[in-house]
């Protein structure tokens, strides 16, 4: 099927109240018509997503905001000018017409305009904002290639194929509704990028199980099938690897080219290279695909390298830490 045919087919399905997987620049989304609660229920049931974890509404044109939000704060305007279309989700006060199931009962709605041409065209042809969480069963690594969607959902979900996604980790989620801007979820757009645009300090939300500012942050996430352990230094890595090789029949190693080239690797080790340690965009792009590859193997444990938390590194370490807690 040609891309354009797959997009028209996807748009038809969205209008008919079905769910459709599609690529964005961050990860694949599992989308439904944002105005159709019955369609949106199918997202929750297909993913096994907890009902109190709200969804992000994706738009292709800023005019669509007028059907979703009650007002547009000046700071949101600045952020949209700087980062849309792109990987930034901004919270707004929601209009009463936005179905409760989108926002899980909150009075705010998260909105983003993706930059991926397939995502934009799908939203345009569907003629409605599309709510879409990441296209993975709840708790599993996000899908960053159409093959992952096929592995996860088989033929039960129609997927518009778009190859690998460019960024590989989800959007940054921010609120400018309080006194100070707060990042609720680290993503491709860093705190420093946002501070430059707003000209004021931005806080990172501290999530605890009691007060999840962004409900999704309290859930188990990105967990590969095998337990994952994070390790800092090359010397410590080699030592842990040798121990793991004695204890387990098959061991996974997830790390940069720099780390993997320095390790002594035994026969019962599967290495997955994330890329150049000095290029964190490359590391983030490859992250979920490599975690997914471990799920296709029979490794009993995954030893993973820690990365610096500057820029997108914050999001990378957030995903890896959650994977290690799975
Ligand atoms: P996903 O759709 O899997 O990328 O996850 C969306 C993330 O955005 C989750 O962490 C949600 O909790 C968060 N989110 C979406 N809407 C809101 C909202 N209105 N308030 C706070 N967090 C939100
Ligand atoms: Mg997700």
Image (spheres, rainbow, N blue to C red):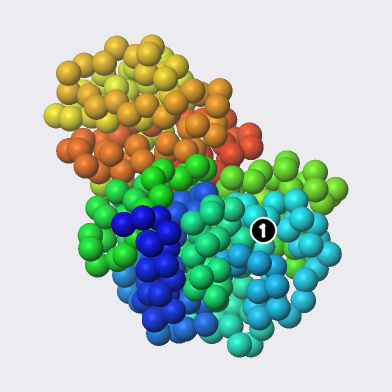
Q: Is residue 285 above or below residue 82?
A: above
Regarding residue 68, the answer to whether it shows in the image is yes
Query: Could you classify mark 1 by the number of other residues whose Cα lies within 10 Å: few (under 14), some (14-19), or many (20 or more)?
Result: many
Q: Taking 215 as reference, is 152 left or right?
A: left
Secondary structure beneath dot 1 equals strand
**Residue linked to disc 1:** 174
Regarding residue 321, the answer to whether it shows in the image is no
Where residue 85 sits, quadrant-wise, is: bottom right
Residue located farthest toward the left when viewing the structure as drawn: 249
Kindly tell me whether mark 1's CB lies below 8 Å from ligand 1: no
Residue lying at 41% horizontally and 50% vertically, measured from the top left: 162
Q: In which quarter of the image is the N terminus?
A: bottom left
Residue 100, position as x, y percentages in the image: 53, 83
Residue lying at 49% horizontally and 73% vertically, measured from the top left: 126
Q: How many labels does the image show?
A: 1
Which one is nearer the viewer's eye here, 239 or 47? 47
Which one is nearer the viewer's eye here, 158 or 183? 158
Residue lying at 36% horizontally and 41% vertically, measured from the top left: 289
Q: Is residue 26 above or below residue 134?
A: above
Residue 176, position as x, y percentages in the image: 75, 63
Residue lying at 41% horizontally and 14% vertically, measured from the top left: 235
Residue 44, position as x, y percentages in the image: 38, 73
Which one is nearer the viewer's eye here, 150 or 178? 150
Q: Taking 123 as reference, is 192 left or right?
A: right
Residue 297, position as x, y percentages in the image: 20, 38
Where residue 258 sits, quadrant-wise, is: top left
């Amino acid at each position: 099927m040609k891309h354009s045919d797959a997009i028209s087919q996807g748009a038809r399905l969205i209008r008919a109240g079905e769910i459709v997987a599609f690529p964005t620049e961050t990860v694949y989304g599992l989308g439904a018509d944002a105005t159709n609660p019955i369609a949106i229920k199918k997202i929750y049931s297909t993913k096994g997503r907890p009902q109190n974890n709200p969804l992000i509404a994706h738009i292709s044109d800023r005019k669509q905001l007028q059907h979703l939000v009650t007002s547009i704060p000046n700071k949101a305007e600045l952020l949209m000018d700087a980062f849309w279309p792109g990987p930034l989700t901004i919270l707004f006060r929601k209009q009463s017409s936005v179905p409760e199931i989108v926002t899980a009962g909150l009075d705010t709605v998260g909105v983003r305009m993706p930059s991926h041409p397939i995502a934009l065209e799908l939203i345009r042809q569907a003629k409605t904002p599309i709510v879409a969480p990441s296209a993975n069963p709840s708790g599993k690594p996000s899908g960053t290639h159409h093959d992952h969607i096929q592995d996860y959902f088989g033929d039960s979900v129609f997927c518009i194929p778009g190859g690998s996604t460019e960024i590989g980790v989800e959007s940054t989620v921010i609120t400018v509704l309080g006194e100070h801007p707060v990042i609720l979820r680290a993503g491709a757009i860093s705190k420093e990028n946002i501070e430059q645009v707003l000209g004021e300090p931005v806080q990172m939300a501290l999530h605890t199980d009691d007060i999840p500012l962004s409900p999704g942050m309290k859930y188990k996430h990105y967990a590969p099938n095998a337990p994952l352990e994070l390790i800092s230094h090359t010397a410590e890595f080699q030592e842990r690897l040798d121990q793991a090789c004695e204890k387990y029949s098959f061991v996974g190693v997830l790390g940069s080219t720099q780390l993997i080239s320095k390790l002594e690797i035994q026969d019962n080790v599967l290495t997955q290279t994330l890329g150049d340690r000095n290029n964190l965009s490359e590391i983030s792009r490859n992250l979920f695909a490599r975690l997914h590859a471990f799920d296709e193997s029979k490794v009993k444990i995954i030893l993973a390298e820690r990365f610096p938390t500057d820029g997108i590194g914050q999001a990378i370490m957030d995903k890896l830490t959650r994977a290690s807690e799975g």
